[in-house]
């Protein structure tokens, strides 16, 4: 424990320092590899596994199926609508989820009652949903429009706050990295893309920027008068800032992941597939990747963008000359 | 100076207590005095409570999108239909710019569903007879189908009393407008007479067959009556314009009705079979422009004009989604959500204790205050704004624990940074706050921008999520400013924390050890606070640690 705190002290003073900004080629390479992987894997799988909200269809949910065979559900539905394709999945401990193509109102009601009868349940214990194919698309389209406008506004705000568009640019690079990886990992596991997952992606987006702003605020503070520094180059100063916030970054990601992990655990154990699990899974990946990218991508990119500015270059050259 | 810091801190805590007390008092008052919708617990959304949610998009025959007024009209009509079908506690809301969401507890029967989806029907029928409604004390079980329904003589026109057959007469007499007199989703034969009531349930009518259909109305608008000289009066009226077919049909109707004895000079306009108005013809109208006058106020004229305009378009509803959640599943979801939240909170606390020792009590206190405020405000919004806590909302709240805890981490780390610079705790708490505050506000602004943008531009569950995000961000900042910071100010004066006790979380002995030997970089207790503040200000302005260390080393060499 005291070692960890000791580490915090040494990172702060610059006594121990991880050379993060200086090894940017390594981080770029890692980012590129992971990005290619997360784009390639879902593509190889044949695209995303879209949830019923995007495909359209009817869904039934049985609570407390008493471990009766799943074939009962198929028979029950096909007794109402012959030849319809039925997909049955167990969710949680004792719930069944049954999906079919879109059924007519009357058929759907009959199927619901047939299911209740087959499993010896009250009518109220079988839930039925029907979702038009436009529903998920509508939600996603709106979310995408909202996302674009948000990015424009937040870029302008960050440029004003940090007085440098380069910070905005670096933050957006990290953001794109986080989103692609989160979406990619989700897709790589072949998990269903539901509106809940889309909400999860939006949370990751807000979190990724939030975390980058916290790190950049320290960078801004440290590099305010960097032109006059005689001991550190611009890149080294950014690196110091990143190191000084490293303990915070680690603590934050752990504290962020803990509640999400508990939702994921409880959500998938007790409830099976559903809103909670989808959001938690996306958030879990997003929080970790988001914290990582603020440190290992946003900061090196920002330093990369700025270190060749004439004033900074001159200051850095002076520092380096003084050392040799 | 010391005293004033403590006073300011105490004042901030009082403010916070005041805010919490205000909302608590408001909720208690609302609940005790029985305000509609007020309750000490937040209302739950359908996915936690169980029930059916139907999302409808209005579709217009010609493919154009429904306007905002039409959407409002459609929602009103659906609300009337749902209420009329005897479903209690249904909510009908407009979501975004094109959807109507109907939420019904339990599982609706197919007829209710059919009713909700049906398009509204506006018709013009002539009045044959009218009488005021007399509520019947008992309903005689008359078998209407046994009665003769063939007119005694062939009716010569739609206003002919010959339409009143034995059966129609019996139905008219038995009709009690205060009872449920129409079947949900009832479709009337346009070639047959209709026995029905007006909206206010004061009068009941026998109406002739349909003579003009609603879709023959080309426009309807309210306005004040202008006299023949062109002067405007203060009387309101509803103006109607018909298309070519409507003009011709309406001309035929008015030429027959005008001059007929009352009530056969009246025509009734029905919406879904209920009379919304029954004006008398005061002229033969051949140009297709009619004006309905009467005791209209601006409001009632606008309502009628909207109804007519809406009814003029055969708006149907396309079901976007129909979701049914059993009450058991809802309960289960809520319970799992709460368990997950609790476990998450416990884990966060364990980790914070591990990391920040005594400071974890500050975190615990802040999180409890945060949870309390969120609860109060969610309960308040659920009462005043109809906010419903959904599963996505619960997930959002749990996730926010991490983000809120981050504010504390940022602050604590800044205080530690200041301590490493060699400041006393009391000064470090202030200096660290100034920096942390900026960071917390800047990052909070990002979250808030995300929340506002998404809230304004999206609908449904995304909107619920955006709302939660915005709410927690604001409360987070509120808690840090009004609770965590003042609490730190007060604690910094306590011996336990100020002395850097092993378990205080500010024990940086390791740091001192590491600096020792490189020039005794350590704070001396004999240095006055002002001096430290002054010198440290100077230092942070100009120098980095390394620079200062070098300087200190030089100093000790001399």
Image (tube, rainbow, N blue to C red):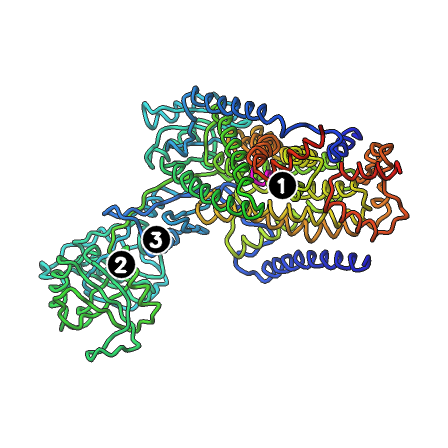
Label 2: chain letter? B
Quadrant of the snapshot with the C terminus of chain B: top right
Q: Which residue is mark 3?
A: B71
Q: Residue B436, image x and y in percent?
A: 68, 46
**In terms of sequence position, does the residue under pointer 3 or pointer 2 come before the other?**
3
Quadrant of the snapshot with the N terminus of chain B: bottom right
Q: CA gap, disc 1 to disc 2?
A: 55 Å
Q: Residue B462, image x and y in percent?
A: 47, 42
Q: Secondary structure at mark 2?
A: helix
Q: Are marks 1 and 3 in contact (CB under 8 Å)?
A: no
Q: CA gap, disc 1 to disc 3?
A: 44 Å
- Bounds of the magenta span? A208-212
Label 3: few (<14), some or many (≥20) within 10 Å? many
Circle 1 or circle 2, nearest the eye: 1
Q: CA gap, disc 3 to disc 2?
A: 12 Å
Q: Secondary structure at mark 1?
A: helix
| Camera-nearest residue between B90 and A25 | A25
Label 1: chain letter? A
Q: Which residue is mark 2?
A: B309
| Camera-nearest residue between B292 and B206 | B292
Q: Residue B259, image x and y in percent?
A: 13, 73
The part of the image, by quadrant, that contains residue B53 is top left
Circle 1 or circle 3, nearest the eye: 1
């Amino acid at each position: 424990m005291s070692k960890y705190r000791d580490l915090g002290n040494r990172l702060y003073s610059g006594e121990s320092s991880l050379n993060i900004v200086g090894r940017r080629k390594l981080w770029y390479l890692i980012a590129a590899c992971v990005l290619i992987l997360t784009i390639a894997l879902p593509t190889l799988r044949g695209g995303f596994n879209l949830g019923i909200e995007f495909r359209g269809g009817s869904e039934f949910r049985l609570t407390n199926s008493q471990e009766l065979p799943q074939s009962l559900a198929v028979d029950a539905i096909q007794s109402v609508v012959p030849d319809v394709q039925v997909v049955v999945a167990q969710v949680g401990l004792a719930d069944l989820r049954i999906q079919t193509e879109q059924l007519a109102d009357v058929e759907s009601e009959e199927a619901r009652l047939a299911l209740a009868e087959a499993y010896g349940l009250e009518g109220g214990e079988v839930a039925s949903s029907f979702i038009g194919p436009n529903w998920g698309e509508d939600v996603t389209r709106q979310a995408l429009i909202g996302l674009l406008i948000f990015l424009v506004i937040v870029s302008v705000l960050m440029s004003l706050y940090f007085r440098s568009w380069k910070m905005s640019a670096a933050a957006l690079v990290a953001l794109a990295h986080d989103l692609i990886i989160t979406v990619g990992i989700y897709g790589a596991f072949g998990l269903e893309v539901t509106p809940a997952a889309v909400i999860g992606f939006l949370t990751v987006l807000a979190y990724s920027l939030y975390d980058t702003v916290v790190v950049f605020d320290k960078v801004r503070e440290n590099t305010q008068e960097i032109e006059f520094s005689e001991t550190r180059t611009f890149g080294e100063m950014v690196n110091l800032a990143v190191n000084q916030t490293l303990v915070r970054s680690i603590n934050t990601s752990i504290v962020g992941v803990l509640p999400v992990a508990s939702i994921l655990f409880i959500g998938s154990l007790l409830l099976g597939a559903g809103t909670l699990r989808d959001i938690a899974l996306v958030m879990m990946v997003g929080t970790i990747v988001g914290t990582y990218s603020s440190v290992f991508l946003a900061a090196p990119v920002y330093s990369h963008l700025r270190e060749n500015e004439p004033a900074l270059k001159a200051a850095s050259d002076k520092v380096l000359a003084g050392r040799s | 100076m010391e005293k004033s810091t403590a006073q300011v801190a105490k004042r901030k805590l009082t403010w916070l207590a005041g805010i919490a007390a205000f909302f608590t008092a408001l909720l208690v008052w609302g609940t005790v005095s029985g305000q509609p919708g007020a309750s000490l617990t937040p209302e739950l959304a359908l996915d936690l409570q169980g029930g059916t949610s139907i999302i409808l998009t209005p579709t217009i025959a010609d493919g154009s999108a429904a306007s905002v007024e039409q959407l409002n009209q459609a929602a009103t009509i659906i609300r009337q239909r749902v209420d009329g079908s005897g479903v209690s506690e249904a909510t009908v809301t407009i979501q975004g710019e094109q959807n109507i969401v109907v939420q019904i507890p339990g599982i609706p029967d197919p007829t209710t569903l059919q009713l909700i989806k049906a398009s509204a029907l506006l018709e013009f029928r002539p009045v044959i007879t009218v009488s005021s409604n007399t509520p019947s004390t008992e309903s005689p079980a008359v078998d209407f189908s046994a009665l003769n329904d063939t007119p005694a003589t062939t009716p010569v026109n739609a206003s002919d009393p010959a339409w009143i057959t034995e059966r129609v007469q019996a139905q008219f007499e038995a009709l009690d407008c205060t009872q449920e007199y129409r079947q949900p989703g009832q479709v009337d034969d346009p070639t047959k007479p209709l026995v029905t009531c007006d909206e206010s349930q004061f009068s009941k009518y026998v109406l002739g067959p349909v003579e003009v259909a609603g879709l023959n109305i080309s426009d309807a608008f309210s306005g004040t009556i202008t006299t023949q000289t062109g002067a405007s009066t203060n009387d309101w009226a509803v103006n109607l314009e018909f298309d070519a077919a409507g003009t011709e049909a309406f001309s035929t109707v008015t030429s027959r009705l005008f001059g007929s004895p009352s009530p056969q000079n009246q025509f009734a306009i029905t919406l879904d079979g209920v009379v919304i108005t029954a004006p008398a013809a005061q002229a033969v109208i051949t140009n297709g422009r009619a004006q309905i006058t009467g005791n209209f106020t601006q409001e009632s004229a606008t309502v009628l004009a909207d109804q007519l305009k809406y009814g003029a378009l055969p708006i149907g509803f396309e079901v976007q989604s129909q979701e049914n959640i059993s009450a058991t599943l809802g309960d289960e979801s809520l319970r799992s959500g709460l368990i997950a939240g609790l476990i998450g909170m416990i884990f966060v606390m364990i980790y914070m204790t591990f990391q920040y020792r005594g400071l974890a009590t500050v975190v615990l206190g802040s999180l409890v205050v945060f949870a309390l405020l969120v609860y109060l405000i969610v309960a308040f919004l659920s009462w005043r704004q109809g906010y419903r806590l959904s599963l996505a909302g619960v997930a959002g709240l749990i996730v926010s624990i991490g983000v809120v805890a981050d504010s504390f981490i940022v602050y604590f780390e800044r205080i530690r940074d200041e301590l490493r610079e060699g400041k006393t705790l009391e000064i470090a708490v202030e200096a660290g706050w100034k920096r942390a505050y900026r960071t917390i506000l800047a990052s909070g602004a990002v979250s808030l921008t995300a929340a506002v943008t998404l809230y304004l531009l999206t609908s449904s569950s995304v909107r619920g999520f955006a709302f939660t995000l915005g709410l927690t961000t604001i409360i987070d900042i509120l808690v840090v400013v009004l609770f965590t910071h003042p609490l730190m100010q007060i604690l910094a004066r306590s011996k336990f924390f100020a002395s850097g006790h092993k378990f205080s979380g500010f024990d940086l002995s390791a740091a001192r050890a590491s600096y020792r030997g490189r020039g005794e970089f350590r704070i001396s207790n004999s240095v006055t606070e002002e001096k430290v503040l002054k010198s440290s200000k100077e230092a942070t302005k100009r120098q980095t640690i390394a620079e200062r260390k070098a300087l200190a080393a030089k100093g000790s060499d001399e």
